[in-house]
Image: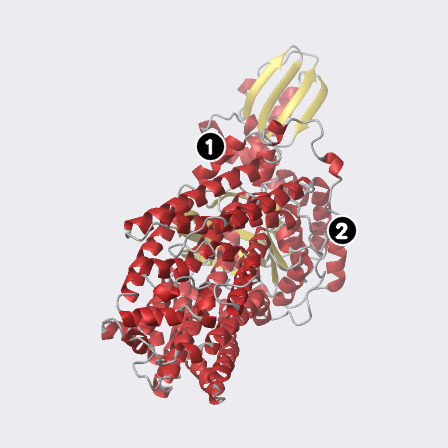
Amino acid sequence: MTATAVRESTRAPANTSPGDVLAGTGTLIRFILRRDRIKLPAWLLGICVLLLQLTTAASNLTETEEQQADVRRFMEGAVGAIFGPGYGRDDISADLYVAGVYGLVFFVLAALMSIQLVSRHTRVEEQNGRAELLRSTVVGRYAQLTAVLTVAVGANAALALMISGTMAARDFGGDGLLFGASVGAVGLVFAGVTSLTVQITEYARTATSIAGAVLGGAWVVRVAGDMMNDYGSSLSWFSPLAWSNQTRPYVDGRWWPLVLSVGLAAVAAAAGYALSDRRDVGAGLVAARAGTPAAAGWLRSPFAVAFRLQRTALIWWTVALSMFGFMFGGFADQITDTDGISEDRIEMFGGSVDTLTEGFLGVITLFTASLAGVMLIHGIQAVRSEETKGRAEPVLATATSRWTWFGSYLAVLAIGLVAALLVAGFSSGVGAAISVGDGSYVWDVTAAHLAHVPGLLVILGIGALLFGVFPRAIAATWVVLGLGLFTGVFGTLMDIPSWLRNVLPMEHAGQPPLDDVAWPAMIILLVVAGGLVAGGLTAFRRRDLETK
Amino acid sequence: MTAAIATSGLVKTFGQTRALNHLDLTVETGEVHGFLGPNGAGKSTTIRVLLGLLRADSGRAEVLGSDPWHSAVALHRRMAYVPGDVELWPNLTGGEAIDLLGRLRGGLNQARRADLIDRFDLDPTKKGRTYSKGNRQKVAIVAALASDAELLLLDEPTAGLDPLMEVVFQDVINQVKAEGRTVLLSSHILAQVEELADKVSIIRHGEIVQSGTLTEMRHLTRTSIEADTNKPVTGLDQIPGIHDLDATDGRVRFAVDGAHLNDAVRALSQFEIRTLISHPPTLEELMLRHYGDELAAVGGGQKSGDDDGEGR
């Protein structure tokens, strides 16, 4: 906290009645519900649809003795700790599997729903100046925060009930409501945390990032704690995510850990209220820092500008992919332990017990490559928003051609892709080499990651072509990427028509290190990517710039 | 003098909307050319065609002797642009944005950059997302004016600036004019154009409806006359070109077409003039001449119609 933005507490309400600071809360609640009449139901329904699908998957995965043994192994040790403390793994059933392994997905979704909800109706409103307009009417100091927290409590309660209903519909045991409440409790905690973080900074994005970092931190603490000890250690209990696991739904359910969740949510929200008193509307507790009055010397070409604007995103993607790769590379030994492995898993990891490690690393490499594809599509969409937000216009009004401007972004993304996959592949390879105890994996896995570059460049090319020809349809690139990942992972288990596999660019890379690098295919993919990019650049040169 | 900007028959449509409808615009080198019209008349579209950001459906455009669509980059080295609605990069400071745009144009004059930042009272260390609309506008103005560009395209450059900054802006533009550079100044602030512009073009529904110096344009419209006379005024309504005549005991008011001003004054002098006030038509009246029917259609009178002009 810096002194500049902190107000004397004498400005706090001294002679106003409690009703004043809450004036208008009821109207604001209805207003929030009106504004979020699509978003909130979409979140709630989306989560329940996902739950319904995962319960089906869980039932299919726990049918036979062999499968159950396999799942049990999956819930043990370091891999198991990623998802949860592993309660009930000795007597596995579908409901247990959903609550114990897939539960994490729902905790994260509930947290994200709450973080976005609270930020959207507090800091985003302030940053855009709309809060000022509202606060100039008969609206109390605490009304906006109270209104959104009320909606957040309602949304998480509804989520708990809907999850409980979904679990009941699948004829799972009696702990559906407890599982639902555990999920809702995580949402509640992060609604409270966000009501605190939005007070700290002037920017909604920073506020949600801090709340997201708290979520990530909570997960890391829980994983570390659960790795130290079966069913969690005392370290685990420092994480709000652990409390929702420690309710042990479908094992021997207990409600009291959720008291901790509600308590933390209340404390965080109270801190949010207290801090909101000590700052001005629109200001943060931390004053905005001044930046440099002049641009750095190297910032003088369109390429440098494109790099400068994409830099932060590229760095974070590389860090995240490397951590992902290192972690899963490190599980190579445990996951590919052939003792009691199921046919499904052998099939998924290459179909042969002999090459199980390579098959597993191939799947992980494909995952990392797909995530790098997400980075590319995000990148293209960022270029598109430069155009639609009106920031491309002044740049293109300088001596910068359309070719150079768009081409620079594409070059930055392509180089960023190679760098990200190089670093992520190396980290993943080091993880695998340590885990299996074979140094050759370092090179093999790095090369495998790089083998995905040409296929991903084709995806970049598709995005570039759409940008030039039909920019509103850039999002269609997601379909290509999504299908590529889906066929890559499940292609062997399902009958994917061969023509579909042939048009998907990532298919042609195969699954290195399991498959050898197919050089002719690589070269063809590079040529195709080059053609698509050239088409996109030419089309962009020929179309109108979209202006505000 | 050669024309810095010359367009003929420019047409640009967006779907059903015809934004430019055979637009003919000429801006001579070295002049400050006022480009007037309300929102949606086609000012920004014209400027974007002149920058080669939009491609005209038909017609011819020439900027500094070249086609703006095909020679965009070469031309942009010699031009600077201030958009009407400036968006900055949220995580770059204003100073960085100024340097970036200047360098991409091919360099900017450091002394002038410092001077402009000082005169416009701009804090260049703040990040783009923290600037108010007026300050974003200042960033774009400094970036454009710190260059040595020979042609400046300014699209409502002072929208969001306070009156003090408006004065600074007029100062700077007069300086630019003294250096012999050309300015196309789109605006709907009439006082600003009246103060700065050598010539004015009025655009309506994508067409230039009138173009010329203010003097020429005034000649084409009516001068209003107000006089006190010793003898009661009679018979003025017989003179052609006199409108809105209102004579009450020794005081007369009327408007007269430029071509008949001489006849009117000669007739008036027979009634022993004691005082005489004549107003040349203001730019507002010139504008209203072209937009008066629209105002009448929406129920605004002739006189109440200037809120579009200076309401910002």
Give the residue pinned by disc 1: B294
Q: Position of residue B65 (x, y in %)?
A: 55, 63
Q: Which mark is residue B151?
A: none
- Classify residue A364 by image quadrant: bottom left
Looking at the figure, which quarter contains the C terminus of chain B? top right
- Image position, residue B2 (x, y; %): 59, 59
SS at mark 2?
Answer: helix
Direction from residue B82 to residue B8 in the image, left or right: left
Task: Residue under label 2, please give it.
Answer: B119
Give the mark toward the camera: 2 or 1: 2
**Nearer to the camera, B10 or A81:** A81
C-alpha distance separating marks 2 and 1 = 40 Å
Which residue does the image show at 23% across and 75% down from the upper left?
A: A498
Camera-nearest residue between B291 and A548: A548
To which quarter of the image does residue A211 belong? bottom right
- Color theme of the render: secondary structure
Contact (Cβ within 8 Å) of mark 2 with mark 1:
no
